[in-house]
Image (cartoon, rainbow, N blue to C red):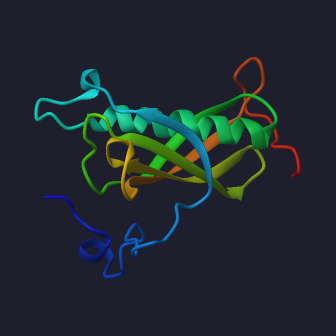
Amino acid sequence: MATTDTETTGTQPTDAQPPNVPPRGELSLRMVAMPADTNANGDIFGGWIMSLMDLAAGTAAAARAKGRTATAAVSHLSFLLPVKVGDVVCVYTEVIRVGRTSMSLAVEAWALPRGLGERHKVTAAEFVMVAVDAAGKPRPVPPA
């Protein structure tokens, strides 16, 4: 059984969404979940969702950094609900902190059941992305 924020810290989970709360940030990626993306139970494999989130974070971070970025860390990853074959997975990103060479992004994956009906948040995480130069060395993030 997964541990919730309430069980580990005594605080309310940050991923809980009341009905009709919109996704956080901007739509960065949209993909249809296909049968090849399933685990042994027939649900969409968590690693596939994480890869979509990483792609979306990288796209948003590269736009903010005006160039190449690399994933440095992923934290607070929560799988909230399963994703089914045919669901449209929408990934939203928001830059929440910018340092000298890195930035943190809130990343949420939402699913539209078979492309119809109400969307619901299925996964959330915080990604730390580092701006890098052509040699892969950290470089300063330009001012906004």
- Which of the 4 image quarters holds residue 64? top right
Query: Quick check: 22 left or right of 8?
Result: right
Residue 93 falls left or right of residue 120: right
Residue for point 31% across, 27% down: 34
User: Relative to residue 38, is residue 30 depicted above or below?
Assistant: below
Q: Nearer the viewer, residue 74 or 22?
A: 22
Where residue 65 sits: x, y (%)? 78, 40
Counting the numbered discs, the total is: 0
Q: Relative to residue 17, is residue 90 depicted above or below?
A: above
Q: Nearer the viewer, residue 45 or 136?
A: 45
Residue reaching furthest top?
135
- The correct choice, above or below, for 97 with respect to 132 in the image is below
Image-based side of 20 in relation to 102, left or right: left
Residue placed at 37% from the left, 48% from the top?
A: 116
Point out residue 110 in the picture as x, y percentages from the top left corner.
42, 51
Residue 91 lies, in percent from the top left, at 51, 45
Task: Single out the residue that lies furthest toward the right.
Answer: 143
Q: Quadrant of the N terminus?
A: bottom left
Q: Residue 118, percent across and down?
A: 38, 59
Write the residue at 55% across / 38% down: 29
